[in-house]
Image (spheres, rainbow, N blue to C red):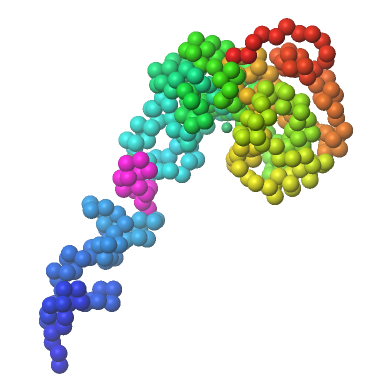
């Protein structure tokens, strides 16, 4: 009987008893030592090439999958319990990278912190205001944050690739009441202008308004039917809203394209759901928790910002309260005749979307 056997790895002969069978091969003690390791979580032996952990922590594939991640920034191996995340974003970070990114003044475009909700729900408004021409400087961003967040963390600031020398100011979700009375927009806008930023005049800037989906109903079905009426309203009154938005046709095509008019809200929704689902649409539906009105051009004029929020609020009102047929029957002048907010009336007059009364207009910033 043969008492010696060949190590399948190095090819040397060894007494049979000294070889270890692993993964269908017979390995000598030296090869076993150099070519394989034991997973520190489950104790299973693996080839070194299959180590999904690090030099310090050997892990088999399934243990890695189950309990570990790598930091998205520095690549360090982390136990899931020690991983940090931003809001519901699924990129994991180690504690020090998370702290570093979190304390940054100008965040990356993908930055999404856990939302702070201000005021009474469920209709929350999140504003994204792009400002340009003042530079992408941390020192300037810091000054804006000091003004905006003097009482609490109202906003954060992000890099935006569509701007030349600018910043994107993003508010946490806020009730309309809070946006109007607690959020220090007057001071923030004045500070931005003082620092050399422009928004409307820069030509590159948008003003996006997110509204929580929950504002449209507790259940997805209700939400969908009200959101269908939002889309219908926007398409039905496209010419008026184009004027309201202060955008050029070109800007809208690029950043906030139309879906195309359909004669009934339900048809509208079917049409939209069948179509392309990118976010560069007039009302972006690709976010899980909000719908985003993207048609408006940026502004650093306080009355225009407030009027825009009031307009979005009004559109939500009619979409929620009216039936499909009532909404179809409503003309633009009937819609604006229901407006009572002074800022919105002023702005509608400025844009000649109200009544034909002459009105004194101050310049857009
Ligand atoms: Zn060997
Ligand atoms: Zn394992
Ligand atoms: Zn890290
Ligand atoms: Zn946006």
Residue 82 sits in quarter: top left
Span of residues in magenta: 67-80
Does residue 101 lie above or below 340 as drawn? below
Residue 6 sits in quarter: bottom left
Please state if 209 lies on the left or on the right of 230 as rendered.
left
Residue 79, given in percent of the width and then of the height, sits at 34, 48
User: Which residue is most to the top?
Assistant: 360
Nearest to the observer: residue 101 or residue 360: 360
Residue 49, given in percent of the width and then of the height, sits at 27, 62
Nearest to the observer: residue 297 or residue 204: 204
Residue 351 sits in quarter: top right
**Camera sees residue 84:** yes
Does residue 77 lie above or below 327 as drawn? below
Residue at (57%, 25%) from the top-left corner? 205
Q: Quadrant of the C terminus?
A: top right
Residue at (72%, 30%) from the top-left corner? 316
Does residue 12 lie above or below 249 as drawn? below
Residue at (28%, 77%) from the top-left corner? 24
Residue 138, given in percent of the width and then of the height, sits at 40, 21
**Camera sees residue 182:** no
Does residue 7 lie above or below 112 as drawn? below
Q: Is residue 322 magenta?
A: no
Nearest to the observer: residue 270 or residue 356: 356
Q: Is residue 75 magenta?
A: yes
Residue at (63%, 45%) from the top-left corner? 277
Q: Quadrant of the N terminus?
A: bottom left
Please state if 27 lies on the left or on the right of 88 as rendered.
left
User: Which residue is most to the front?
Assistant: 250
């Amino acid at each position: 009987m043969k008492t010696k056997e060949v190590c399948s790895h190095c090819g040397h002969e060894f007494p049979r008893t000294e070889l270890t069978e692993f993964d269908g091969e017979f390995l000598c003690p030296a090869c076993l030592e150099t070519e394989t390791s034991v997973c520190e979580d489950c104790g299973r032996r693996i080839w070194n090439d299959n180590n999904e952990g690090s030099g310090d922590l050997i892990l088999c594939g399934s243990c890695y999958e189950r309990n570990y991640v790598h930091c998205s920034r520095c690549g360090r191996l982390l136990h899931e319990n020690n991983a940090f995340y931003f809001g519901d974003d699924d990129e994991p970070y180690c504690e020090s990278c998370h702290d570093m990114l979190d304390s940054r003044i100008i965040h990356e475009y993908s930055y999404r912190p856990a939302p702070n909700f201000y005021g009474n729900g469920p209709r929350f408004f999140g504003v994204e205001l792009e400002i340009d021409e003042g530079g992408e400087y941390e020192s300037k961003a810091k000054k804006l944050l000091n003004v905006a967040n003097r009482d609490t963390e109202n906003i954060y600031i992000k890099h935006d690739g569509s701007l030349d020398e600018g910043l994107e100011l993003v508010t946490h979700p806020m009730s309309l009441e809070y946006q109007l009375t607690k959020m220090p927009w007057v001071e923030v806008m004045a500070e931005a202008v003082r620092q050399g930023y422009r928004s409307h005049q820069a030509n590159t800037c948008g003003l996006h308004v997110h509204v929580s989906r929950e504002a449209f109903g507790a259940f997805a079905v209700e939400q969908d039917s009200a959101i269908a009426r939002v889309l219908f309203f926007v398409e039905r009154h496209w010419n008026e809203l184009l004027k309201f938005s202060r955008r050029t046709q070109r800007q809208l095509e690029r950043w906030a394209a139309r879906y195309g008019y359909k004669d009934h809200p339900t048809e509208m929704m079917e049409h939209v759901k069948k179509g392309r689902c990118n976010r560069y649409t007039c009302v972006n539906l690709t976010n899980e928790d909000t719908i985003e009105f993207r048609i408006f051009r940026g502004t650093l004029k306080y009355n225009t910002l407030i009027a825009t929020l009031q307009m979005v609020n009004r559109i939500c009102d009619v979409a929620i309260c009216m039936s499909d047929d009532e909404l179809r029957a409503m003309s633009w002048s009937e819609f604006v005749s229901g407006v009572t907010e002074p800022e919105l009336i002023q702005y509608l007059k400025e844009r000649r979307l109200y009544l034909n009364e002459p009105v004194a207009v101050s310049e857009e910033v």
